[in-house]
Amino acid sequence: MFNLIKDWREQRILDNSEFSTTDWVQAAKRIAILDRLDEDEMKRLFDLTT
């Protein structure tokens, strides 16, 4: 029961928060392992995470 409420709350926060493409790119640049991804892979990752 509490997991349902927790999940709902987390999803609500994510749905109501603004995370721009610029924010995403800046965050991704700080993760060294992502340097290995090509442009198409980065685009797919962006689509999956936003």
Image (cartoon, rainbow, N blue to C red):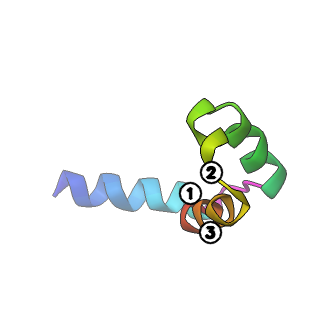
- Rounded to the nearest angstrom, the CA distance separating label 2 from label 1 is 25 Å
| Residue 36 spot, x, y in % from top left | 61, 43
Q: Which mark is residue 14?
A: 1
Q: Earlier in the sequence, mark 3 or mark 1?
A: 1
Residue linked to disc 3 = 47
Crowdedness near tag 1: few (<14), some (14–19) or many (≥20) residues, C-alpha within 10 Å = few
The segment highlighted magenta reads: 16-20
Gap between marks 3 and 2 measured at Cα: 14 Å
In the rendered view, would you say 29 is above or below 6? above
Comparing marks 3 and 2, which lies closer to the viewer?
2
**Of marks 2 and 1, the one in the foreground:** 2
Of labels 3 and 1, the one closer to you: 3
Question: Given the image, on which type of amino acid does mark 1 rest?
Answer: Leu
Structural crowding at the residue carrying mark 2, measured as other residues with C-alpha within 10 Å and reported as few (<14), some (14–19) or many (≥20): few
Q: How crowded is mark 3: few (under 14 residues within 10 Å), some or many (20 or more)?
A: few
Sequence-earlier tag: 2 or 1: 1
The one of 19 and 28 positioned closer to us in this rendering? 28
x then y, percent, for residue 19: 72, 54
Tell me residue 26's x, y (percent): 78, 39
Whether residue 43 sits left or right of residue 33 in the image: it is right
For marks 3 and 2, the one nearer the N-term is 2
Q: Mark 2 points at which residue?
A: 37
- Badge 1 element: helix
Main secondary structure along the magenta-highlighted residues: loop
Q: In which quarter of the image is the C terminus?
A: bottom right
The reply to whether dot 2 and dot 1 touch (C-beta < 8 Å) is no
Give the total number of marks visible in the rendering.
3
Residue 9, by quadrant, is bottom left
- The type of residue carrying mark 3 is Asp
Residue at the image point whose x is 66% and y is 40% from the top: 35
